[in-house]
Image: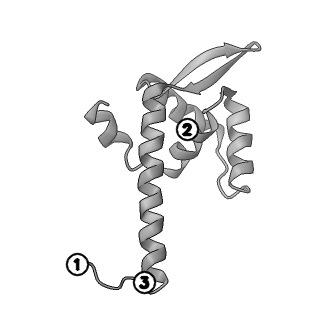
Amino acid sequence: MDEALRKKYIPMTETTYYTLLAVTTPRHGYAIMQFVGRLTQDRLLLGTGTLYTMVGRLTSDGIIEARQEEGKKAYLLTPMGLELLGEETKRLGQQLSDGLKILSGGAQTVD
């Protein structure tokens, strides 16, 4: 993977992360907003300006691709996007694991 893209996207913003989760299957803009809202129980609500600015950037960087589906423009994760999403998910998992370990009193020092 291109190191410049890795530096640009890892760590990801929360909105980018959830948008990439949404486009693991083709979705148009409004469907992305609905999916993210449902997945986060409306904790994260994407506005159209935020979404379409981000989608434009992700498309131009080759992280997602645009395609026509049922007369609408839909977006889908590219293989590079899937790799980035996997890497970020792994990073977040490790972060969560470390936090749970410390907060549960498991490891108070790092050797």
Question: Looking at the picture, how far across and down is residue 111, in whole percent?
Answer: 22, 78
Between residues 1 and 4, which one lies in front from this camera angle?
1
Q: Mark 1 and mark 3 in contact? Answer it, CB < 8 Å.
A: no
Toward the left, the furthest residue is 111
Between residues 47 and 36, which one lies in front from this camera angle?
36
Q: Mark 2 and mark 3 in contact? Answer it, CB < 8 Å.
A: no
Dot 1 or dot 3: first in sequence order is 3
Mark 2 vs mark 3, foreground winner is 3
Give the residue at mark 2.
20
Q: Secondary structure at mark 3?
A: loop
Q: Please name the residue shown 47% across and 58% down the image.
A: 93
- Indicate the amino acid at tag 3: Gly
Give the residue at mark 1.
111
Dot 2 or dot 3: first in sequence order is 2
Q: Please name the residue shown 42% across and 64% down the image.
A: 95
Within-10-Å neighbours for mark 1: few <14, some 14–19, many 20+: few
Distance from disc 2 to disc 1, alpha carbons, whole Å, reads: 36 Å
Q: Secondary structure at mark 2?
A: helix
- Check residue 31 in the rendering and tell me which mark sits there, or answer none: none
Give the residue at mark 3.
106
- Indicate the amino acid at tag 1: Asp
Question: Looking at the picture, how far across and down is residue 79, in whole percent?
Answer: 46, 26
Q: Is residue 18 above or below residue 61?
A: below
